[in-house]
Amino acid sequence: MADVLEFTYEVSDEDFTRAGEASSDVKKKLKKLGVSPDVIRRVSIALYEGEINMVIHANGGIITIRISEDSITMILDDKGPGIPDVEKAMQAGYSTAPDKVRNLGFGAGMGLPNMKKNTDSIDIETKIGVGTKVTMVINL
Amino acid sequence: MENYGQSVYLLENQCKGCTNCIKHCPTQAIRVRNGKAVITTDQCIDCGECIRICPHHAKKAKRGFIDAINNYQYSVALPAPSLYAQVNHLDDVNILLTALKDMGFDDVYEVSAAAEIISEESRKYVEEHPEQWPIISTACPTIVRLIQMRFPNLVDNLLPFITPAELAARQARARAMERTGLPADQIGIFFLSPCPSKVTAANSPIGHKKSEIDCVLAIKDIYPALVDSMKIVANRPEELAISGKIGISWGITGGEAGGLLSDSYVAADGIENVIHVLEDLEDEKFSSDLEFIELNACNGGCVGGVMQVENPFAAKAKLQKLRKYLPVSAVHAAKTYPYDVHWDKEVEYLPVFELADNLKESMEKLNQIQELCKRFPGLDCGCCGAPTCRCLAEDIVKGIAKETDCIYVLKDYLHKLSENIDKISGV
């Protein structure tokens, strides 16, 4: 019996244009499950922002999605540089993205704020030089 | 589930059971079963891709034929703007319109005239509803169906307006009644259509109840007679044209958006490109000050419709040349007749892709699908009759296919079977 459905995605650092593949696939699955359109929208935005962050800052990583009858949990795990000041990073408009990334239209400093805005809870575990694990939950 | 009576259908005796259509269907609505294609009707959006791709011409679009004018005392032809792009060297639209009368219609009413009203009303609507930006055009019924089925979050962005063809039909009937004194039911309104999705829209309209279009004809069916009639009337065209540049431009991609006289728009054409735009729009990847999105299922816009004659790119060039010396708009001519363009029936999300009607059951099914997928080779060869391994897995879970439909699974199965036989017989 499937009380919890779990999917994992590897986010590649090789090609940033592939960022968004995981959120796109999750979106398809949620539509199959009949999850409400509003939840689908929130999941795909939060996840897309997370994916972009993993590509820009952390050379990729692993995304795990857990779906249960009452919640959707998204865990984004990377081996990147870590976030020196989480509080600052959560502020709208704050960004450490390099110019070459900003030139592509990313790095507006809305990633984490958007993730927070669209989820019911967000937890960030980060260690400098080791990596970051972001856990987001959306209740159903 | 609402069944809206698709126009695309299969000619079974011509179908060879190949995999071309299943591979090109944007909603994965086709399967090959027992050597013949089968369309899952509630997932079909009448885009016509299968008609375009079928090498055996086994897919057709239901439509009406011109003899039906005999069923009415008075008949009016509504030419789609893209029709003007089908003929060579057209420098006066009146010749084409007069030729339609020569073919047997009593009158003509240009869809492009109604389109100009929709352009004008859209300009106001877009300006007055910034909360709905970007507003998505609804002139292509295939796009609206696609959004209803696959993009529930975008349903609220739809421009709640009837199509130019529908408005033209309402106005044409009003004008015909005024001119003839005949009752409404003795006037036949015939839309000359570029595509099957307009046939479906006339049978089961989106956003309003009954359509005023009585019969939809394919442009390619009337084309030969039209060209002949144009030669006959070339020297005596009547003054029938009542539209300008803005209306005629609706026949090509960017035409509708151009009519808004704003720079803040995106215009995409071709069903795969459209899906890409909708996916990105759903993820809020477009700038928040984008006002309007025009989407056309066919390459190049309506000139690319599957019931057209001319190459869509050549047609586009012709339309651009034709519109060059037309007045910008003649909208006041069409405003003589009633022109309420708003939808009066709600357009809702159609969750045709859901696995079950409750989350628990859907999760169980999705889990089974994931497990089944692991057993398939992931080649998406289509030999089983489903477009992808994943679709086969879904079909099995739905109970409409079996694992051994996969030739790789079957091969393994037979291999094991023969090993067992060898063991038993002691070879």
Image (spheres, grey):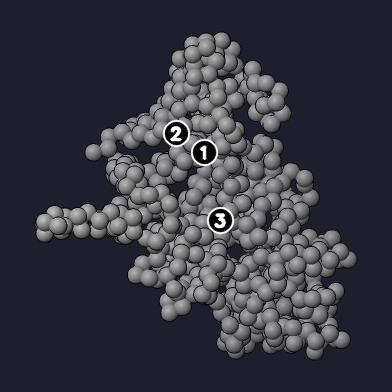
Q: Position of residue B342 (x, y in %)?
A: 62, 56
Mark 3 is surrounded, within 10 Å at the Cα level, by few (under 14), some (14 to 19) or many (20 or more) other residues, namely many
Q: Along the polypeptide, which appears first: circle 1 or circle 2?
A: 2
Marks 1,2: beta carbons within 8 A: yes
* SS for dot 3: helix
Residue at the spot of label 2: A9
Residue at (61%, 59%) from the top-left corner?
B297
Q: How many marks?
A: 3
Q: Nearer the viewer, mark 3 or mark 2?
A: 2
Left or right, B32 with respect to A19, comes to left
**The residue under label 3 is which amino acid type?**
Val
Labels 1 and 2 in the same subunit: yes
Q: Nearer the viewer, residue B409 or B335?
A: B409
Q: Nearer the viewer, mark 3 or mark 1?
A: 1
Q: Position of residue B189 (x, y in %)?
A: 63, 77
Residue at the spot of label 1: A21
